[in-house]
């Protein structure tokens, strides 16, 4: 079960991001977010130091996952395709041309504050699912790299961050899917028979709601 603090935290992020999607960053103030979310300024600052931190947590946490998306991931025919689907959702969540200015704010904040990792409880689901999928893909013979799945998870997170930086540096012209999955296949030593499977999944990502919130989730794949 998620706590009252986490529910408020999620509400602030959801409200803030909805305002930021609809307005320029500089025109969305903390008082505006507080008014829309129905909270006080002290409450906001008990969760976030600034708007930039709110944005960084949205793009750096497990907010791209909800029950509908988890169901799509778990409905894949095998563990490797499930892992691909989760990465596709993460890439689409972060490498969004319509939100490039917000993503740049997120990366800038993380670099400035030296916080390339977000608060663990909000990134936990992503990490937990990735670990389980890598471990299962190893067992099923899709992933031939026999390293500890914990270390492989860290490698995948580093790939995600590097991929996002390259995408932003190239003003959204960078082919985020090809670069990421070529490197993912190399790092995980994917069985040759399953290399390139991601290409058939890219064109069939369902439409999901834009801003997601953490939920009490169980039964992850």
Image: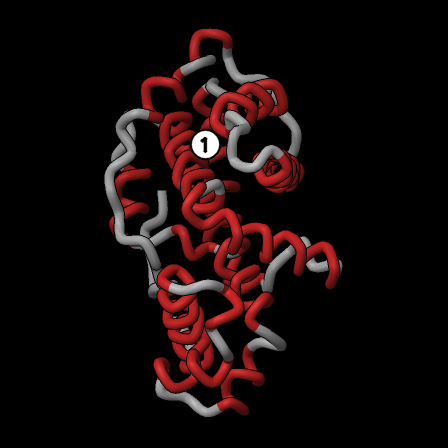
Residue 149 vs 123, above or below: the answer is above
Q: Position of residue 33 (x, y in %)?
A: 43, 79
Helix, strand or loop at disc 1?
helix
**Which quarter shows the N terminus?**
bottom left
Q: Position of residue 44 (x, y in %)?
A: 51, 83
Of all residues, the one furthest to the top in this rendering is 193
- Residue at 54% across, 54% down: 60
So how many labels did they put on this image?
1
- Residue at 59% across, 51% down: 104
Q: Position of residue 147 (x, y in %)?
A: 66, 29
Residue 196 vs 97, above or below: the answer is above
Residue 39 vs 208, above or below: the answer is below
In the image, taking residue 19 as reference, residue 192 lies left or right, namely right
**Which quarter shows the C terminus?**
top left
Check the image and tell me how it is coloured: secondary structure
Q: Visible in this render: residue 62?
A: yes
**Of 181 and 72, which appears nearest the observer?**
181
Q: Which of the 4 image quarters holds residue 217?
A: bottom left
Q: Visible in this render: residue 144?
A: no
Mark 1 surroundings within 10 Å by alpha-carbon count, few (fewer than 14), some (14 through 19), many (20 or more): some
Residue linked to disc 1: 136
**Of 184 and 132, which appears nearest the observer?**
184
In the image, taking residue 136 as reference, residue 180 lies left or right, namely right
**Of 177 and 127, which appears nearest the observer?**
177
Q: Position of residue 205 (x, y in %)?
A: 29, 33
């Amino acid at each position: 079960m998620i706590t009252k603090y986490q529910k408020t935290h999620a509400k602030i992020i959801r409200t803030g991001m909805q305002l930021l999607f609809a307005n320029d960053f500089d025109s969305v103030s903390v008082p505006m977010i507080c008014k829309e979310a129905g909270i006080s300024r002290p409450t906001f600052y008990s969760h976030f130091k600034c708007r930039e931190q709110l944005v960084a947590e949205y793009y750096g946490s497990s907010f791209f996952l909800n029950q509908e998306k988890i169901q799509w991931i778990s409905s894949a025919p095998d563990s490797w395709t499930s892992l691909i689907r989760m990465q596709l959702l993460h890439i689409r969540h972060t490498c969004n041309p319509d939100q490039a200015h917000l993503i740049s704010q997120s990366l800038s904040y993380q670099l400035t504050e030296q916080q390339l990792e977000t608060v663990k409880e909000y990134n936990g689901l992503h990490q937990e699912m990735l670990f389980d999928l890598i471990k299962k893909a190893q067992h099923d013979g899709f992933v031939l790299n026999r390293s500890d799945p914990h270390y492989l998870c860290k490698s995948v997170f580093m790939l995600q961050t590097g991929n996002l930086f390259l995408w932003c540096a190239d003003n959204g012209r960078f082919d985020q899917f090809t670069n990421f999955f070529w490197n993912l296949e190399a790092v995980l030593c994917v069985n040759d028979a399953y290399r390139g499977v991601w290409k058939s999944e890219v064109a069939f990502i369902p439409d999901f709601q834009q801003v997601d919130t953490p939920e009490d989730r169980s039964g992850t794949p």
